[in-house]
Image: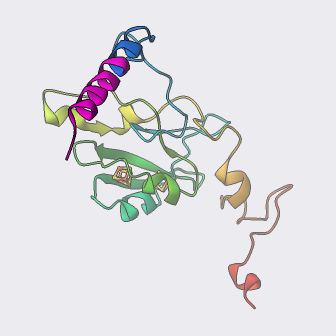
């Protein structure tokens, strides 16, 4: 059974703890006046980036929309005259997105990337549907160097993949098989 002395001791410890905190610097940050920089890998709003040459990286391969667990990405593929694919339109419904990052993992061109920008609250839910014009940015995001077509080659009217000047033949995936 607890004695009167134990109760007084517990009370004293409680007061001492409170007293000690009176002289500590506060650790509360007054958001939104103070905005702590977030790590580059933070998973928030998604953008479509460009390659170092300024071209759109997205080749409308549909991998991101296929892997998205909540089906919030949609697009329509189109092809330029030189054979390069692009998304005629590209749409992400951020009202459904769960910021899992799977689309970024699946993207072969490093086009789709999640950013640390998270302040996107909207009173009208329809404003959370972003079209390509809003998603496409003028930089390379986290991947400054990667240029998919420099690796994959491009089939044009002047020749197939690997037949252009200074271009290596495409790697055959079957050649890697045992
Ligand atoms: S972060 Fe996840 S939920 Fe959001 S668009 Fe990408 S795959 Fe879909
Ligand atoms: S963003 Fe990436 S994964 Fe999605 S369609 Fe474009 S190239 Fe494919």
Residue at image coords 49%, 52%: 104
Q: Residue furthest right?
A: 166
Q: Above or below — where is 28 with respect to 121?
A: above
**Is 173 covered by the magenta stretch?**
no
Residue at image coords 79%, 64%: 163
In the image: residue 178, left or right of residue 121: right
- Quarter of the figure with residue 20: top left
Q: Above or below — where is 149 with respect to 50?
A: below
How many numbered dots are placed on residues in this image? 0
Q: Residue furthest left?
A: 124
Q: Above or below — where is 18 with respect to 83?
A: above
- Quarter of the figure with residue 17: top left
Where does residue 14 sit, x and y in percent of width and height?
30, 24
In the image: residue 162, left or right of residue 132: right
Q: Magenta part of the protein: which range?
A: 1-16
Where does residue 83 sit, x and y in percent of width and height?
58, 56
Residue at image coords 32%, 52%: 73
In the image: residue 103, left or right of residue 3: right
Q: Considering depth in this image, is 70 or 25 the residue closer to the camera? A: 25
Where does residue 75 sit, x and y in percent of width and height?
34, 52
Q: Considering depth in this image, is 82 or 114 the residue closer to the camera? A: 114
Residue at image coords 74%, 69%: 170
- The answer to whether residue 78 is seen in the rendering is no
């Amino acid at each position: 059974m607890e004695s009167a002395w134990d109760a007084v001791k517990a009370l004293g410890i409680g007061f001492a703890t409170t007293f000690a905190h009176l002289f500590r610097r506060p650790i509360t940050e007054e958001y939104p006046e103070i905005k702590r920089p977030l790590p580059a890998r933070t998973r928030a709003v998604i953008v479509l980036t460009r390659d170092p040459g300024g071209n759109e990286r997205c080749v409308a391969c549909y991998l991101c929309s296929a892997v998205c667990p909540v089906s919030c990405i949609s697009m329509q593929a189109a092809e330029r005259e030189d054979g390069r694919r692009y998304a005629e339109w590209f749409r992400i419904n951020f009202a459904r997105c769960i910021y899992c990052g799977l689309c970024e993992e699946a993207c072969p061109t490093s086009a789709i990337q999640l950013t640390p920008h998270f302040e996107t609250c909207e009173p009208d839910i329809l404003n959370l549907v972003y079209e390509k014009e809003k998603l496409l940015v003028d930089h390379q995001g986290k991947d400054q160097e990667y240029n998919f077509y420099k690796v994959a080659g491009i089939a044009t009217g002047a020749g197939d993949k690997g037949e252009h000047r200074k271009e290596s033949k495409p790697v055959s995936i079957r050649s890697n098989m045992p």
